[in-house]
Image (cartoon, grey):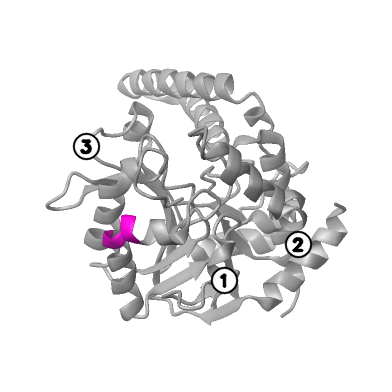
Amino acid sequence: MKFTEFLSAYSSFLSSCTREEISKDARFAFLSDLHMGDGGSRDDLAPNRELLKDLLARYYLDRGYSLVLNGDIEDLSKFNYSKIRPAWADLYEIFDAFHKLGGLRKIVGNHDLGLLKIQDYAYPLTHGLLLKRGPDRLFAFHGHQASRLFTKHDYISHFVVRYLAKPLALKNTSVSDHRKRRFRLEQRIYRASKALGLAAIIGHTHRPLFESRSKYDSLRWSIEELVAEYPGAPVERKTAIEELVGLYRRELSRLSGRDKDRSASRYDPERLLVPCLFNSGCATGRHGITALELDRGSLSLVHWTGREGPKPYILREALEQEAVEGTSSVRFLLRRTELEHLFARIRLLGGTGRPE
């Protein structure tokens, strides 16, 4: 697919999606890729059931956040909705609570497109949500729209997942597990969002991104910053820097060994990366759940863990950590940026974008 073709399609898609003006006090939590199943051994979300309920009901709902569920919430490619609904009745009650307060936005992905055919489905559905805050635009959509496989041949992926993956008890093997396709998809969305001067919030790939940076990018650049600081640092700080560089290098090595394409994670040949692409990750991680938060004037990437606790990298990298009272759930703030600063960088580094 030529980029000019994709940009035209992306612009048309943007124009067709739900739009919402938000105030400077708005609070939104973005989660995607829950992949709710039948509650059994093949249900990818089942291990994180209590953690997800805690963070939604005891944190975001209590603090007045609106909830944006950004696609692949119910996994209709592997399970019938009639099996999913009773298996997750407690989670739907939490969705109901957000909905009754006017705080639920539900976006469809490639694994839950079938919800559009359910006439009595409980919540309004949309393909994308454009949040406007003055001249600034945040565009939330699942992300499969940038993949030719899912937009032109979705029935193929549906057949593979439903009739092969489920009987074999395989985890979801979508674009999230195909590195080159994932990179191309992210790159298309990055380039189109840069051209239009907006910030895109996606899911689909299961890979958290913040300001167009993957975890690999963030680790690499953190090491570079620490190395630059080291020569002029006091003795005590040098010791701390040595420990951090060692920790980050081990994590970087682990990532590189698991995914050799991560080193080619930048989407732009220019030296300056435009911070226009974000990804909330997924709720089916072995070590917890990731999410994005729009909290008044800031946008943050957070990682949630339960009783098992986070990996050492998360403990050292987190800017803040907060336990949810009465639960074993802990919220780790990994990245934060002010919206005013974010959109100034998007405009200055990527151009002014197109007019409405």
Q: Is residue 279 left or right of residue 63?
A: right
Q: Position of residue 219 (x, y in %)?
A: 51, 31
- Quarter that holds the C terminus: bottom right
Task: Give the residue drawn at x 71%, y 35%.
Answer: 180
Please name the residue that numbered disc 3 is placed on. 307
Residues at circles 2 and 1 in contact by the CB criterion of under 8 Å: no
Q: Main secondary structure of the magenta part?
A: helix
The answer to whether any part of residue 301 appears in the image is no
Which label sits in the foreground, 3 or 1? 1
Label 3's element? loop
Q: Amino acid at mark 3?
A: Arg
Q: CA distance from mark 2 to mark 1?
A: 31 Å
Q: CA distance from mark 3 to mark 1?
A: 37 Å
Q: Amino acid at mark 1?
A: Leu
Q: Is residue 194 left or right of residue 125?
A: right
The first of marks 2 and 1 along the sequence is: 1
State the residue in front, 56 or 37.
37
Q: Amino acid at mark 2?
A: Ala
Please name the residue that numbered disc 2 is placed on. 195
Residue range in magenta is 86-90
Residues at circles 3 and 2 in contact by the CB criterion of under 8 Å: no
State the residue in front, 161 or 238.
161
Please name the residue that numbered disc 1 is placed on. 116
Q: Which mark is residue 198?
A: none
In magenta segment, residue 319: no
Q: Is residue 63 left or right of residue 118?
A: left
Which label sits in the foreground, 3 or 2? 3
The first of marks 3 and 2 along the sequence is: 2
